[in-house]
Amino acid sequence: MRTGIDYSERIPNNVDLSGDRRLQRALESWQPGFLDWWSEMGPAVGTKDVYLRTAVAVGKEGWAHFDHVALPDYRWGIFLTERDEDRTIAFGEQRGRPAWQQVPGEYRADLQRLIVVQGDTEPASVEQQRLLGATAPSLYDLRNLFQVNVEEGRHLWAMVYLLHAYFGRAGREEAEALLHRNSGSADAPRILGAFNEETPDWLSFFMFTYFTDRDGKYQLGTLKESAFDPLSRTCGFMLKEESHHMFVGTTGIDRVVSRTAELMAEHDTEEVAACGGIPLDVIQRYLNFHYSVSLDLFGSEISTNAANYFTAGLKGRWQEERRKDDHLLTGDAVYVDVVKDGKPATDEVPALLALNHDLRTEYVADCENGLKRWNRILSEAGVDTRLALPHVGFNREVGAYSGHQVSPDGTIVSAAEWTSKRDGWLPTEIDKTHVKSLMQPVHEQGKIASWIAPPRNGINGRPFDFDYVHFA
Ligand code: BYC
């Protein structure tokens, strides 16, 4: 297999597309629909060019090339990590057998479903972020928005390739449907809840890229373990790109928190709204919202779907090969969250049924790292207030806590108490209006909006005041 990527091809790829004329033609006939979708749903801001990262190889070193690219010339391609001829299945009933290069008939429907759900999230996030370009706080941030969006578009290509190459006519139909569903649409919404929410401002964008893209990291990590080798290799390469998206979220929230702390010190007040900043309690409410809707993306704590996917070898656990057990889990039991007698409690259940809970637990521990960072920034600035993750049961619509009203500290409260306290816990209309009022574009090189600190470093060794974007 070639590892370098040839950009003179209509669809750059490292899967020898030209060796399969039928598949190549099928994907070429999907391409115009994708380009129409991008021009209708991609970033709504006219640019001459943007300083973007493009994948040029899939190896460990030097896989990316940075340059100014005119968006009409941007090329989305199909890139899988290199094939390991000796790869064996790491878990489930077929553990130890060679990884599958084709889809076994009995798992066709389940694998297709997993790929469609994964594929559906990618264009959804681009749709959600469509209007953000008009209010970017700096050229650096605008460039990052474009980077995230073009790569989400590429991740759609990744799933569409699998659907076309391995799932026949049904796969081609699903690939079409991926372009027809739309985030927030009443008639044809995206599949998972969080992807139908709005991302109307940059604080939401940073929260989304911190919390929701991080679900992506964990879900892709489990699909990378899949016995279906092309899916595993596709997700392996997507994960490389994904880490920049989470970096945008992590450092974006760093910079908002820093600026808020700076304004608090300068004006000796927590009420920084009047000084053009975002108060810490507003940041906390945005965090509560994005974390809780992202937790819903893990499905129910107890899930026969997840058990079946695991036993069949379709979807593993986070870092499956590092786990010290039999990778079958038939005799194991674990504790999961339940609600008992009106209180959050735990119950012992077969480990196989608790795999969504297992993955969510890994995710929650990872999310805590962000909180540590942001609280360190506050502490170093001499601010006593701390940000915190709300309880996992807070504001949930999927799983054990759905149907219960849980406060951020984990107490189950009455519907009346929830309603009376909700405005202290989730973003209010006043919060959103204030944040929106701050969203004034800053398009001057080296300048930044009032509500956010500049980044410590630029992209690819460039300074913050680099000309990341040229406008049309
Ligand atoms: N919304 O056994 P259950 C990313 C459905 S993000 C709506 O509880 P299961 C990205 C479920 O489909 C990562 N429906 O859960 C981030 C099932 O329906 P059926 C995306 C939901 O199946 C940022 C029923 O409820 N990738 O990459 O174990 C930017 C019972 O299901 C929801 C994946 O999610 C929900 N939240 O797990 C860009 C990986 N939750 O089948 C990109 C692929 C559950 O009975 N997907 N349901 O009709 C999966 O592994 C699983 O489908 C889920 C659900 C983890 C989502």
Image: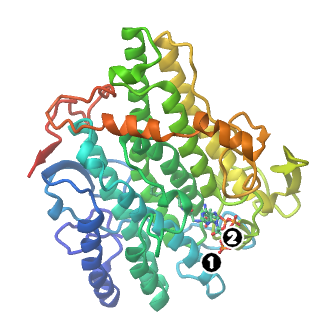
> Callout 2: few (<14), some (14-19), or many (20+) C-alpha neighbours within 10 Å?
many
- Compared to 262, does 406 lie above or below? below
275 vs 82: above or below: above
Q: Residue at x 24, y 29 (%)?
A: 448
**Where, quadrant-wise, is the N terminus in this rendering?**
bottom left
Which residue is identified by label 1? Answer: 110
Decide: marks 2, 1 in contact (CB < 8 A)?
yes
Which of these two is toward me, 313 or 286? 286
Numbered label attached to residue 309:
2
Q: Tell me residue 370's x, y (percent).
A: 53, 33
Compared across the picture, whether 354 is left or right of 81 comes to right
Task: Work out whether residue 337 or residue 327 is closer to the camera in this orientation and state it.
Answer: 337
Pinpoint residue 446: horizontal percent, then vertical percent: 17, 29
Dividing the image into four quarters, tell me where ligand 1 lies: bottom right
Q: Name the secondary structure under disc 2.
A: helix
Q: Looking at numbered disc 1 in the image, what kind of residue is underneath it? A: Asp
Cα gap from disc 2 to disc 1, whole angstroms? 8 Å
Instruction: Classify mark 1: helix, strand or loop.
Output: helix
Residue under the point 57% across and 40% down: 426
User: Where residue 285 sits in the image (x, y, percent)?
Assistant: 54, 36
Along the line of sight, which residue is nearer the eye, 112 or 185? 185
**Can the viewer see residue 128?**
yes
Task: Check mark 2 vs ligand 1: CB closer than 8 Å? yes or no.
Answer: yes
Instruction: Kindly identify the amino acid type of the residue bearing the numbered disc 2.
Output: Tyr
